[in-house]
């Protein structure tokens, strides 16, 4: 083993000086783009807060947090149901909010040249975005995550844009759709996931709204797990119960056959691949039903499931198609893949940003599915609404009370949670004598009901209660569902109870 070169004190000083200059240079770049180093928040990933693929957002100022805390103590009033109606102008402004696009490249370029070019393009995009829009929501600031999206779009033949049907307009980027359809000339299928959480009228209204604004868009309904399985842990939820698998496969076949950029050979390959996939899904479902019947009757004498004989390593064909899944965090991309394959092949979690790197899975010898990490696209939405939509990790929310107030103004939280007035006369100095519900009072009442208390003083743990209420909303136990414009006027006679 060669002897290590001695490291002098002078060399150490030069190293520290170089690090300081690099830090100063990064600070200048953020200041020019409106992203100061003191308010750049790095989300915590399983590889640590400084992970290469961790979520990066703009952190709120302390003055804003304290101001929101004061407002949360004031009584709130329920808003009109029309406040839940959103259009594309409400989310993205008058024009189409752009996204960073990968620059032109070729195989003659080195890795360093390509990365430098991508950084320059990303910096220009950030400067234009922050100078054009002032009240931006949370959006992805990590270039590495945008690179994952670029690569998935390049290698995929069909793009599945996954959204949560409770608020699909928040997860749909018109700029991304136009780039895929017009520039890349690839078909896009919009998947409205988690349809078991909302009414059928809401699903139909969102489908008609998207098809009216984007005629080239194919819309499919999907539910990875039925409603009765939502109280079960992710590890114990059974697969093969998904609704919408056949409709999704048929949509892949239809949109590819109607795509003008595909030649006849590719269209025939896609039709053959989808039929093969559909046959495998039906076979897996029949095998699972057979296993369930055998387990219930106790006839499985050998102790082996019938599914073990069907497991095999898939040898992919040299001519295959790739179906890419893109979308915001926590919309169910990984769960859809597990439901389509009928077994757990990718890890999934309720925490946004669980998938860190794009991964490919061969479903059949002719079909490869590509799972991508979630991307938070820039919008003009209030940040409290983004937290309720699940794109921002609840565990990293520093001030959850404004989000609880936004939820309480639109959902009858006091009735749904069965809350009672938490304060006794004279127990709290600033508490009103009459029950005038505020976001802070709702959190205190929930903390009292659940037994959330601080460790030392034994006071009501208001922050933990607010965090728990937000988790109930994100996981679907409390449903906050937005509607398209004109919903309540058009469907006023229909039952819209979620």
Image (cartoon, grey):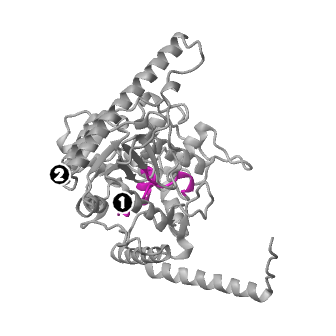
Please name whichever residue, 419 or 184, is drawn nearer the observer in this view of the structure. Answer: 184
Direction from residue 18 to residue 118 in the image, left or right: left
Is residue 269 visible in the rendered structure shown here?
A: yes
Q: Which residues are magenta?
A: 371-397
Question: Can you say whether 280 is above or below 476 in the image?
Answer: above
Residue 149 position by quadrant: bottom left
Q: Secondary structure at mark 1?
A: helix
**Which of the two discs, 2 and 1, labels the residue nearer the N terminus?**
1
Q: Secondary structure at mark 2?
A: loop
In the picture of the structure, the residue carrying the numbered disc 2 is 215
Q: Quadrant of the N terminus?
A: bottom right
Residue at 34 percent of width and 48 percent of height: 319
Tag 2 near tag 1, CB within 8 Å: no
Direction from residue 352 to residue 48 in the image, left or right: right
Picture coordinates of residue 498, whole percent (x, y) = 34, 35
Taking the magenta stretch, the answer to whether it contains residue 372 is yes
In the picture of the structure, the residue carrying the numbered disc 1 is 154
Picture coordinates of residue 7, whole percent (x, y) = 79, 82
Direction from residue 239 to residue 380 in the image, left or right: left
Picture coordinates of residue 479, whole percent (x, y) = 40, 40
Question: Can you say whether 472 is above or below 393 in the image?
Answer: above
Disc 2 to disc 1, C-alpha distance: 23 Å
């Amino acid at each position: 083993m060669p002897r290590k070169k001695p490291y002098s004190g002078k060399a150490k000083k030069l190293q520290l000086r170089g690090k300081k200059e690099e830090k100063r240079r990064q600070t200048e770049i953020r200041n020019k783009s409106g992203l100061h180093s003191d308010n750049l928040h790095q989300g915590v990933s399983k590889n640590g807060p400084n992970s290469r693929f961790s979520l990066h957002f703009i952190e709120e100022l302390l003055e804003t947090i304290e101001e929101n805390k004061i407002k949360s103590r004031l009584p709130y009033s329920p808003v009109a149901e029309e406040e839940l109606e959103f259009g594309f102008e409400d989310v993205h402004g008058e024009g189409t909010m752009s996204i960073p696009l990968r620059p032109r490249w070729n195989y003659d370029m080195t890795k360093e040249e390509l990365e430098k070019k991508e950084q320059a393009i990303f910096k220009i995009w950030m400067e234009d975005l922050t100078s054009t829009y002032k009240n931006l929501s949370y959006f992805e600031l990590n270039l590495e995550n945008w690179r994952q999206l670029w690569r998935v779009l390049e290698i995929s033949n069909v793009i599945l844009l996954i959204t949560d049907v409770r608020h699909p307009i928040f997860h749909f980027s018109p700029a991304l759709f136009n780039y895929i359809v017009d520039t890349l000339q690839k078909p896009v299928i919009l998947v409205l996931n988690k349809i078991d959480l909302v009414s059928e009228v809401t699903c139909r209204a969102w489908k008609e709204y998207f098809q009216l604004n984007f005629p080239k868009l194919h819309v499919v309904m999907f539910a990875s797990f039925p409603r009765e399985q939502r109280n079960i842990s992710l590890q114990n939820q059974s697969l093969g119960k998904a609704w919408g698998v056949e409709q999704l496969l048929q949509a892949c076949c239809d949109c590819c056959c109607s795509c003008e950029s595909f030649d006849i050979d590719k269209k025939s390959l896609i039709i053959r691949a989808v039929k093969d996939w559909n046959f495998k899904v039906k076979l897996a479902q029949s095998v699972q039903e057979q296993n369930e019947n055998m387990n219930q009757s106790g006839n499985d004498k050998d102790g082996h499931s019938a599914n073990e004989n069907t497991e095999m390593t898939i040898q992919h064909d040299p001519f295959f198609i790739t179906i890419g899944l893109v979308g915001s965090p926590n919309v169910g991309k990984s769960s859809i893949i597990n439901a389509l394959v009928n077994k757990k092949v990718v890890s999934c979690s309720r925490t946004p940003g669980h998938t860190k790197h794009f991964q490919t899975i061969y479903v059949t010898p002719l079909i490869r599915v590509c799972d991508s990490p979630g991307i938070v696209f820039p919008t003009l939405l209030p940040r409290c609404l983004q937290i309720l939509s699940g794109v921002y990790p609840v565990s990293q929310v520093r001030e959850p009370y404004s989000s609880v107030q936004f939820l309480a103004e639109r959902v009858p939280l006091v009735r749904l949670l069965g809350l009672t007035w938490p304060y006794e006369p004279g127990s709290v100095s600033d508490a009103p004598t009459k029950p005038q519900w505020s976001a802070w009072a709702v959190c205190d009442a929930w903390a009292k009901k659940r037994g959330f208390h601080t460790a030392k003083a034994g006071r009501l743990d208001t922050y933990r209660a607010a965090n728990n209420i937000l988790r109930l909303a994100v996981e679907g136990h409390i449903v906050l569902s937005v509607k398209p414009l004109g919903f309540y006027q058009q469907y006023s006679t229909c039952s819209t109870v979620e």
